[in-house]
Image (tube, rainbow, N blue to C red):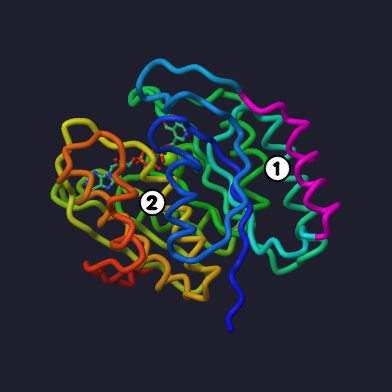
């Protein structure tokens, strides 16, 4: 029997609704991965409501929790670490120390960094020091980096001008250390206005994927977190980079279709669970030069 992978997921938790671990844990479990959620913040709701309550986890808790798992002899079973929304740069440094510790006991363990930098216009609020930490330290330690367009542009210090430019910028990030860059959402001048586009860049090539752009009165939150979580889960289950990319696009699209059908602002993960596990739609990634 094939072993079930284990994944340490370090990102936000919201009591109500879905963002961070609250968007990713259940879908990752639903596709067949054991998830160890470590919540960097516990907020009442995601920050795009404009108000929230709750608190940031004390950074010292991260090594303490990793130590606890080590003490019961389980740390070596961790196949991957995922990091997303951080409450402080100090938390970020504690995560990198945790990744190093896990890699020392399991050199095959992967680290996926979703560099959530916030989006002031959309109301996604992230402290400035977190963005500096992601740019300066985290990217170089990641095996898989999953920026959105804004985050890709921040890494490169300029705005992308075309798809070809995005490919070049993502490929440039591989030089920092990651094996793979997944751009979860492309937004460059001249792109098609009826499609939602993503990009995968590995050492072996680049792939572009298009799925239909759906209309929402208010853009749902947590899509990025769902995307990076499912991608890592499928990689751990044995998919190639491209197969995991295609699966993720399909499963996320299924969630958005369900969310749209319910006229809901929050992602409809529970209702969409069978569609997450077995997407009916399929999108083929196209190889692109660069
Ligand atoms: N197929 C789709 N149709 C319409 N909107 C989508 C679709 N897929 C994702 N979205 C939206 O696109 C946006 C992607 O946000 P962005 O900031 O680029 O990435 P992230 O989700 O990582 O923060 C989100 O607002 C999400 O709700
Ligand atoms: C608490 C929290 N976590 C995570 C996110 C990231 O969500 P997304 O997946 O849309 O980037 C947000 C966005 O506002 C948030 O408020
Ligand atoms: Mg995001």
Spatial CA distance of label 1 from label 2 is 22 Å
Is 206 magenta? The answer is no
Residue at 53% from the left image edge and 53% from the top image edge:
145
Residue at 61% from the left image edge and 34% from the top image edge:
40
User: In the picture provided, is 111 more to the left or to the right than 251?
Assistant: right
Q: Quadrant of residue 10?
A: top right
From this viewpoint, is residue 17 visible? yes
Residue at 58% from the left image edge and 80% from the top image edge:
2
- Name above or below for residue 165 compared with residue 6: above
Mark 2 secondary-structure assignment: loop
Residue 279, how many percent across, how many down?
A: 28, 66
Span colored in magenta: 56-73
Residue 14, how many percent across, how many down?
A: 47, 32
Q: Quadrant of ligand 3?
A: top left
From this viewpoint, is residue 153 visible? no
Residue 214, how many percent across, how many down?
A: 16, 47
Q: Nearer the viewer, residue 105 or 33?
A: 33
Is 62 magenta? The answer is yes
State the quadrant of the C terminus: bottom left
Q: Nearer the viewer, residue 1 or 53?
A: 1
Q: Nearer the viewer, residue 133 or 28?
A: 28
Label whose residue precedes the other's in the sequence (1 or 2) = 1
Q: Mark on residue 95?
A: 1
Residue 131, how many percent across, how many down?
A: 56, 32
Indicate yes or no: mark 2 CB to ligand 1 under 8 Å.
Answer: yes
What kind of secondary structure does the magenta stretch mostly adopt? helix
Callout 2: few (<14), some (14-19), or many (20+) C-alpha neighbours within 10 Å?
many
State the quadrant of the N terminus: bottom right
Mark 1 secondary-structure assignment: helix
Instruction: Name the residue tied to disc 2.
Output: 184
Indicate yes or no: mark 1 CB to ligand 2 under 8 Å.
Answer: no
């Amino acid at each position: 029997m094939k072993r079930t992978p284990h994944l340490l997921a370090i990102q936000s938790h919201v009591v109500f609704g879905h963002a961070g671990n609250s968007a990713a844990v259940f879908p990752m479990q639903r596709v067949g991965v054991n998830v160890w959620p470590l919540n960097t913040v516990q907020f009442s709701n995601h920050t795009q409501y404009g108000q929230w309550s709750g608190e940031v986890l004390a950074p010292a808790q991260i090594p303490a929790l990793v130590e606890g798992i080590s003490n019961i002899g389980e740390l070596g079973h961790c196949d991957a670490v995922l990091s997303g929304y951080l409450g402080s740069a100090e938390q970020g440094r504690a995560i990198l120390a945790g990744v190093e510790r896990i890699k020392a006991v399991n050199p095959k363990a992967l680290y996926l960094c979703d560099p959530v930098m916030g989006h002031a216009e959309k109301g996604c609020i992230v402290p400035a020091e977190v963005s500096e930490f992601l740019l300066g330290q985290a990217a170089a330690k990641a095996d898989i980096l999953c920026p959105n367009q804004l985050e890709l542009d921040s890494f490169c210090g300029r705005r992308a001008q075309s798809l070809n430019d995005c490919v070049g910028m993502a490929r440039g990030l591989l030089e920092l250390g990651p094996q793979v860059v997944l751009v979860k959402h492309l937004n460059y001048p001249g792109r098609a206005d009826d499609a939602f586009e993503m990009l995968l860049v590995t050492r072996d090539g680049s792939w572009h994927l298009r799925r239909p752009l759906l209309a929402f009165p208010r853009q749902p939150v947590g899509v990025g977190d769902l995307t990076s979580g499912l991608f890592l889960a499928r990689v751990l289950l044995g998919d190639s980079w491209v197969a995991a990319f295609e699966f993720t696009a399909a499963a996320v699209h299924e969630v958005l279709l369900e969310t749209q059908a319910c006229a809901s602002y929050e992602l409809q993960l529970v209702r969409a669970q069978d569609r997450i596990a077995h997407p009916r739609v399929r999108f083929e990634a196209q190889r692109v030069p660069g």
